[in-house]
Image: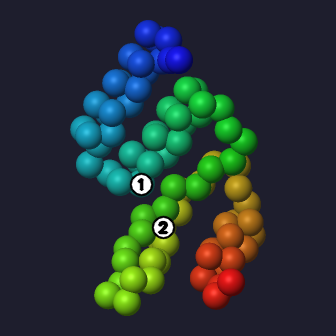
Amino acid sequence: MLSQSQWLGINDLVLLINRNEDLKHMRRYFLDAVDLLLPYDRAAFYIFSEADDGRVTLTSPVCRNLTEEAVKEYEQLLNSDI
């Protein structure tokens, strides 16, 4: 169960996300804020779009503690037909 302080943090996060007009800045802030509530080692926040055929394309990642090489490998894995 979340504490009162954690709920207030979530409320502040939602408010700041909705105020932010710069999508890249908002995603960085979101990753930083979530780490305070739910600590993690690595994260990526992508923008996605869905084509008419149902395929999803991920673009413009904002990452924390991930190398560029790791991000490229992840994207290749997602784009493969496994």
Determine if residue 72 is in view.
Answer: no
Q: Residue at x 72, y 42 (%)?
A: 41
- Amino acid type of disc 2? Ser
Vertical arrangement, residue 64 with respect to residue 2, above or below: below
Numbered mark located on residue 24 in the image: 1
Is 26 left or right of 78, judged from the image as shown?
Answer: left
* Among the two numbered marks 1 and 2 on one chain, the one whose residue lies closer to the N terminus: 1
Is 10 left or right of 43, judged from the image as shown?
Answer: left
Is 1 left or right of 55, judged from the image as shown?
Answer: right
The quadrant the C terminus occupies is bottom right
Q: Position of residue 69 (x, y in %)?
A: 74, 69
Numbered mark located on residue 44 in the image: none
Is 72 left or right of 59, judged from the image as shown?
Answer: right
Instruction: Classify residue 72 by image quadrant.
Output: bottom right
Q: Nearer the viewer, residue 39 or 81?
A: 81
- Amino acid type of disc 1? Lys
Q: Which residue is mark 2?
A: 60
Q: Position of residue 45 (x, y in %)?
A: 51, 55
Q: Position of residue 36 (x, y in %)?
A: 57, 27
Determine if residue 38 is in view.
Answer: yes
* Tag 1 and tag 2, C-beta contact below 8 Å: yes
